[in-house]
Image (tube, helix red, strand yellow):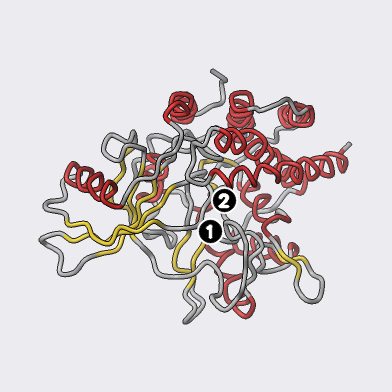
Amino acid sequence: MNSFIEPRIHYILNRKEQRKKLGPYQPKSSEMIEKSLQALLEAEGIANPTIENVSRMTGGASKEQFSFNLSCKDWTAPRPYVLRMDPAEGIVETCRLREYQLMKALQGTVPIPPVLAVDAEGDYLGNPGSIAGFVEGVTKPSNHNSTSVSGIGSTYGEFANVLAPQFVEILTKIHNWQDWSDHDISEFVIPKANSREAALYQVDQWSTIWRTDMEEPVPLITLTEHWLRENAPICKEPCLVHCDYRVGNFMFSEANGEITTVLDWELAHFGDFHEDIAWIVQKLFGCVDEAGNFLVCGLMTREDFLAQYQALSGRTIDSTTLHYYEVLNAWKCAVMDLSSAIGAGRRSNSHQDLLITWLGSAGAVFLDQIEKLLLKVS
């Protein structure tokens, strides 16, 4: 076991090796989902739950999702919920218990769906899963035609000016959240302050994933791993990072442009805030406006984003550290695309096997990005 892998992550990665053998993927009917939900909710102490209108949800590249209505004898009306469940294998392996703990702890701090229950080992659902409230909103304007995958490449048009300041404000609230000692986040490890642990936790985790899921050797992946270890920056004050905060992972109301919720907390951990900044500014998540300007997540220029974040958060972005995490993020994406995605698709272990196999082709895009980034510091 590498010295900088969180125990729960180490367990999840080992568990994945066993779950790989559960395929190929077999779709579950609405009746099967309803029965599983009934068992889970009763085990959670919800008396006489009535589950209706189970419906498979589209979107996403990693988790299987269903919407449903839940009624209980003490409720005056049914409430909508979303079941988020692991496939046997996917583009990324994460922990439903960690995600549940964090979302529960963050209630009231940032716009986030309310959580109801978690089945950490799949004892009731058959696969690990969690239940959260359904939140109204859209991930992109409904009048914009788009064939984007997972929100990538979406544009916000007239909503951009309204959404941009909220986007930055919510990010600063995530990074400035400090009262984690008041909540159960027992499945997380917080790196030591003024150390290189924040970076090394990520390098060790993703290098383990690469060695486990690798389809074929890629010299640039190995070279980059060595560079990341040798150049790991000191993180003065670790904080919560979302790690997938971007276009497509927040919803907003078209009535007033207000962000209603932030989605997909599965990769969140405690680390260096530069990791989130570097993730957000990736070209993959942006677009070019009519004037030819690149817009970060379709919202604002890179310069505006960095300036607004620093002004609002009180933090100073270090350009060398930011560059390091741009390399690390591109490397992580290349690892996902060139190992886990291809393998899960090849073994037909995911409900999204065609999509994640197609995403495997993006590995070359990230290798090109890594090369360009490393050449800047060579």
264 lies above or below 260:
above
**SS for callout 1:** loop
Reading the image, the residue beneath label 1 is 249
Identified at 63% across, 33% down, the residue is 339
Quadrant (top left, top right, bottom left, bottom right) of the C terminus: top right
13 lies above or below 361:
above
Identified at 44% across, 60% down, the residue is 110
**SS for callout 2:** loop
40 lies above or below 11:
below
Q: Position of residue 144 (x, y in %)?
A: 60, 75
Estimate the spatial distance between the alpha carbons at disc 2 and disc 1, rounded to whole Å: 7 Å
Which amino acid, by three-letter code, is at mark 1?
A: Asn
Q: Position of residue 371 (x, y in %)?
A: 83, 40
Give me the disc on residue 244: 2
Does 282 sit left or right of 220 as displayed? left
Figure quadrant of residue 79: bottom left
Q: Position of residue 33 (x, y in %)?
A: 29, 48
Residue found farthest to the top: 1
Identified at 16% across, 50% down, the residue is 46
Sequence-first tag of 2 and 1: 2
Which amino acid, by three-letter code, is at mark 2?
A: Asp
Q: Which residue is nearer to you in this view: 297 or 153?
A: 153
Give me the disc on residue 200: none
